[in-house]
Amino acid sequence: MRPDIRLATSDDLPDIERIVAQAYGHYVARIGAIPGPMRDDYSARVAQGTVHVLQAQDAVHGVLVLIREDDCLLLDNIAVAPQAQGKGYGRDLMQFAENVARRMGYDYIRLYTQEKMIENIAIYTRHGYVETHRAEEIGLKRVFMKKALI
């Protein structure tokens, strides 16, 4: 049975914050800073309608933050609980994000990740994202990537 991906509600906040902390917490030592997703205000994001959750077997296992921009959709955050990794949930969330972008009429979807999160860069590259540039924001060295949807 495939998971359900739905818009998050305030009831999902404890799961969202737990999953983000679990998915990104191990990067703190590697990058020497708190990753951007761990700094986000998920209560505000949920109220804005930008957060989706992946639910399977009556539990939330994934988080997806999508932000509409003028020229493309920003995949701002994607996180899967460590105990749920390896089940294709990350791929499901990425495909969902691309489908949302297409439905909104965008030709591109973009994302960024911290430059020391090399595993994530490799995953995004395998899924067709290409690096556009690197920059430092909020004290984090980020790699920006984009994928054509046409």
Image (cartoon, rainbow, N blue to C red):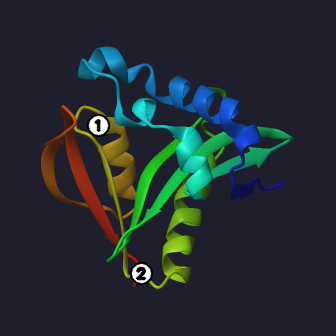
Residue count near mark 2 (Cα–Cα under 10 Å), binned few <14, some 14–19, many ≥20: many
Quarter of the picture holding the C terminus: bottom left
Residue count near mark 1 (Cα–Cα under 10 Å), binned few <14, some 14–19, many ≥20: few
* x then y, percent, for residue 48: 56, 56
* x then y, percent, for residue 102: 50, 80
* x then y, percent, for residue 95: 55, 64
Q: Earlier in the sequence, mark 1 or mark 2?
A: 2
The numbered dot on residue 106 is 2
Please say if 5 is above or below 28: below
Amino acid type at image mark 1: Ile
Look at discs 1 and 2 and give the one toward the viewer: 2
Please say if 38 is above or below 148: above
Q: Residue 75 occupies which quadrant of the picture? A: bottom left
Image point 36% across, 73% down: which residue? 72
Would you name the residue on which mark 1 appears?
A: 118
- On screen, residue 114 versus residue 41, left or right, reads left
The numbered dot on residue 140 is none
* 1 and 2 marks in contact (CB < 8 Å): no
Q: Residue 29 occupies which quadrant of the picture? A: top left
Label 1 vs label 2: CA separation?
Answer: 27 Å
Image point 52% across, 25% down: which residue? 21
Does residue 135 show up? yes
Amino acid type at image mark 2: Tyr
Quarter of the picture holding the N terminus: bottom right
